[in-house]
Amino acid sequence: MRRIFILIVAIIICVSNAVAQGGMWLPVLAQQRIADMQKNGFKLKAEDIYSVNKACMKDAVVLFGGGCTGEFVSKDGLIFTNHHCGRSFIQQHSTLMHDYLADGFWAKNITEELPCEGLEIQILDRMELVPEKYGDMSDDDNRRAVIADYQSKYGDNLEYSVEGFYGGNVYYVFVYKVFRDVRLVAAPPSSVGNYYSDTDNWMWPRHSGDFSVFRVYADKYNNPTDFSNANVPYHPKSHFKISLKGLNDGDFTMVFGYPGVTESYLPSCAVKFRQDVDLPARVCVRQLEMDLMEEAMNHDRQIKIDYASRYSGVENGKKKWEGAIAGLLSCNAVGRKQELEREFQSRLSTSELRGKYSNIVRAFCSIYNATNIKAARCVTYFTESIYGLSQFKAGEQLTRLKNSMANPSSNIDNEINNVESKLRSVFDKRDSTLERNLFSALYKIYCDSCPDFLPDDLDSLYASHDIADAQDFVNCFYHGSAAAQLQTALNVVAECREALKLTGKKREVKIESIVETLKHDIGVYFYDSNIKMLFQKAYFTYRDMIQAEDDMYKRYQAALLEVMPEVIPFPDANSTLRFTYGKVGGFEPRDAVVYKSFTTLDGVIAKDRPAPADYDAPSALEALHRNRDYGRYADKDGSLHVCFVASNRTTGGNSGSPVINGDGHLVGINFDRCWEGTMSDIMYDPSICRNISVDIRYVLFLIDKLGGAQNIIKELEVVK
């Protein structure tokens, strides 16, 4: 491992600027990139990016909620992130009377801030290369040994993880502070924070004021703790100053955050599988789900509130995958990978490593045989359709109840309580008609798409219940299953509790009757039979395929590092802290189509119309535009910039990431990528791959002029 690490550092130092544009660099290795960054307009030093001895940027960047990024913008723990990252917590506090999603929320003082149950903020304290003495990090015992040693070194009040890079050829240990008292401070109305988003998601030009504001709280010693009214605002080691200077084409920008997953070094066969099999299946199911939700949401305001976050998540993935498919095809990703493989084989033929790696590409591609692909397709359809159904989850809880009652233990009361809690969660804020329509459509598309992966006894069940097809099955479910409605399910739970109060033979007979009834409940059958089918017919084949893919990906990356090191200068993203840098600039995605770098409030108003709600800007925003009441937030040309694009390589998890200028000041909040470049998770093309950010001046304008939250503005360090 040490030899590979030394090779990696050498590659990073020598990598060309063209490759650097698509780099997702480890902050601990910032020193190896600093010369190129400074050449491109960065004015600070490597230790300003990452240091364990002084306050630096890494102390101002947080992992927000486990799937997004945020940044500290004040000495009192104020955090900026995206509106879509905070949406579920805004929804958590929204009611018909106080619809913060629709109307926005602006805490005018610290007492009005709202606690967000379940929201965690992680701050990286340090990352260190795992020494070779610990051995193979794929061994759980070795990982635990690393964590135990680091706990004894840095304390057990921190959290630790060991993460692999370059397919697991190198490992680092990450040390985090984790804060669990986080409160909502501000959010614009969805008609601003999500403006045109359902239509324009992943697209450019964009006009979303995609931000929300939270605050981290700590105990009186500035340490992480659970929620308490006695807690006080956290004082971070570092926070970003905010620039009003604005940006021009060609200006340096850096994005610092927690990108989720990329697969930059896959061979052609793996790219083809994703392009032709996996992603199309996901798009197909999600489009159907979206159509049903959208129809219901357009006719019922309560459904629109309750399903807003779910719909957004479904739509977000669907549109991204559509763009990825289109991008992979348009840039001939499979062909380019095949060309690289031919060069790899050519170099290998004259290398002393040919015996070690001569068959590696062929071995990798043998994973994608017909049997494995059929199983993988089944798992994709299953997880995208059946697995997410509320009826499936309700059936799961009744199955747990049946099994618990069949063999009562001393812990049976807790088990029943857990089942009841999960059932309430399954049905919470779910519309019964919409859920039934989703059941009908998603169950049918699974049955039609995966006819070889159905329960073996399904035909006999259909015959015994006079069921003709998937729709009949759903009707039967709703006529006879306790899993169809919350109250009927809770009645079974109550019956179980009453049975346990009995003694002797009466107890035994009653429990046996309940278990027998549940055995024949079609909702229990739906869950139990499909889970058994999945594991018996598809899952283990799929699991072995994924394990083989992971093992081969590790070997293939090791081979590239040794044979063609220039093509693998940085590790794939894996939800650990990275920085990437590029420049502001438009692009030309298609013939005769030219996109500029910036959008303005003029564009927001040009799109404005009363329906659909995506396009309906608040009247107060219209008035501010009409009066050109932009204050100090206007650009030098007098317009108010809303969003901009740059060539930073980002992915899921970078939502909410700070966009930093050459002075190290905050100039934007990253929130999306351009649709034409969403294939960058697999292949980055600097000519069309662009990240999209909301201009920080628009954020301040909205907080100040639209929200009237001058208390927040006063808390920020604003520089010109």
Image (tube, rainbow, N blue to C red):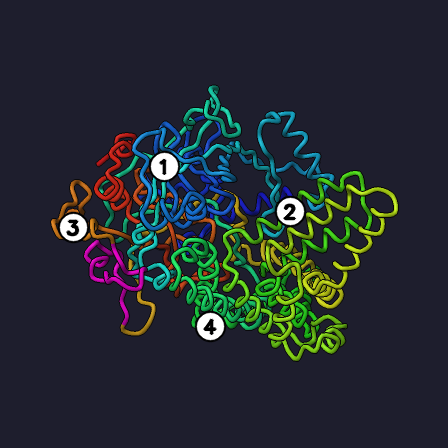
Q: Compared with residue 121, is residue 408 higher up or lower down, i.e. above or below?
A: below
Residue 35 in the magenta stretch? The answer is no
Q: Is residue 624 left or right of residue 372?
A: left
Would residue 100 be found to the left or right of residue 624 on screen? right
**What is the CA distance from the residue labelled 1 to the residue labelled 3?**
25 Å
Q: Identify the mark nearer the N-term, 1 or 3.
A: 1
Q: What x and y, as percent, mark residue 514? A: 77, 54
Is-magenta flag for residue 598? yes
Residue 62 relative to residue 660: left or right? right
Q: Amino acid at mark 3?
A: Ala
Badge 3 vs badge 2, beta-carbon distance below 8 Å: no
Pointer 3 local density, CA inside 10 Å: few below 14, some 14–19, many at least 20: few
Which is nearer the eye, 405 or 132?
405
**Amino acid type assigned to the residue bearing label 1 in the image:** Val
Q: Which mark is residue 329?
A: 4
The residue singled out by tag 1 in the image is: 185
Q: Where in the figure is residue 304, as x and y percent of width and height? A: 41, 57
Look at the numbered discs 2 and 4 and tell me whether their residues touch, using CB distance below 8 Å.
no
Question: Which of the two discs, 4 and 3, sits closer to the camera?
Answer: 3
First reached walking from the N terminus: tag 3 or tag 2:
2
**Which quarter of the rendering shows the N terminus?**
top right
Judged from the image, the secondary structure of the residue bearing numbered disc 3 is helix
Q: CA distance from mark 3 to mark 2?
A: 50 Å
Q: Which residue is mark 2?
A: 420
Rendering quarter of residue 263: bottom right
Mark 1 or mark 4, earlier in chain: 1
Task: Please give the residue where the numbered disc 3 appears in the rendered image.
Answer: 623
Q: x, y percentage for residue 352?
A: 67, 59
Say which amino acid is labelled 4: Leu
The quadrant in which residue 565 appears is bottom right
Residue range highlighted in magenta: 593-617
